[in-house]
Amino acid sequence: MPLQLSRLIISGLPRGRGAEMRWIAYETQQTKTISIAQAAIRKPQNFQFNFKRFVIHRLILKDINLTDDFICFLRLQLSSADLSQLSQLTLSKVDFLNANSLTLHCLLAVVGKNLENFEVHDCYNMRPDSITDAHLIQLNAARIRRISIDGVKLCRMGNSLRIGDESLQHFASLKSFPAILLDRCIVTTNTVCDYTQEWFDSVDEGEKRLRSQVVTVKRCVHVKGSAFEAECRKRGLSCRNRRGSGSLTLYNVHEENTHRVFTVALAAALMQENQENDEKPVEILTNKETIPTK
């Protein structure tokens, strides 16, 4: 009988001794934890007798060393499970030191098409190619609702992840506008403006409900508030700015003859690493309200 797993949490054991797998089923109020020795990960042991019963809804990797061996082990287990209901993949406090660009790619090749929520939070020893545009494009634009990459801690090999204009252009071209949070990326002002305009163009004029969306850009040095405002005006979009809370400046973008508003909240990226904790995020808030036709 299938077991609906609300969460499958895999975390690392102390001193690299292996991993702990914990599955939680809210519906049946069941939980179970097993420990896996590092040897069983290097030469993958198949836990098919468990995974063939699993219908996994959320997969969480936490406090673990991301390696090719671990991903091969995980893919073997997931090959026996039902992933049709998998809506969320979270990487939290994961060590990327021994990972390369293909490591995450191999995992997303298995789970990416089903995800609605993709999160990478407080991961460290990351390189510019740890997560790139190519990884985000593996996600299914028709299903993805939220992408959150925050608290990025890079090693000395680079200052930014290679996530830039291509990702926003890809989703906008498919009329997909997931909530996005990007930290230490290379997206540019012009593409943020393109994304704004594409959002306006994609809105169904017949829709008569409040619609909102959030895109947050942190520590992305190529996004400038003054340049965004100037670019909007070049395109004939009305843009007014006002002071927000803290260091935020809000840019309210209006489209003529409609009541739709796209609000961009920008905070300057601080260049010094020792000032990271004082940085404020850049938020792009989209709100749309249409007035019913009488």
Image (cartoon, rainbow, N blue to C red):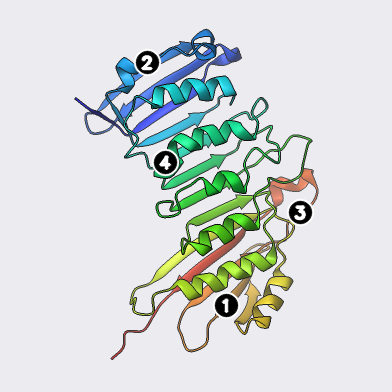
* Amino acid identity at mark 3: Leu
Q: Which residue is mark 1?
A: 253
Q: CA distance from mark 1 to mark 2?
A: 53 Å
Given this view, does label 1 or label 2 mark the residue nearer the observer? 2
Helix, strand or loop at label 4? It is strand
Q: Residue at x 60, y 69 (%)?
A: 194
Vertical position of residue 103 compared to residue 253: above or below:
above
Q: Residue at x 32, y 39 (%)?
A: 84
Vertical position of residue 155 compared to residue 11: above or below:
below
Q: Which residue is situated farthest in the bottom direction here?
A: 294
- Please state the horizontal and vertical placement of residue 18, each as a whole percent of the image: 52, 14
Q: Which residue is mark 2?
A: 47
Q: CA distance from mark 3 to mark 1?
A: 25 Å
Q: CA distance from mark 2 to mark 4?
A: 22 Å
Q: Which residue is mark 3?
A: 270
Depth check: 222 or 243 in front?
A: 222
* Amino acid identity at mark 2: Phe
Given this view, does label 2 or label 3 mark the residue nearer the observer? 2
- Please state the horizontal and vertical placement of residue 68, each as a whole percent of the image: 58, 23
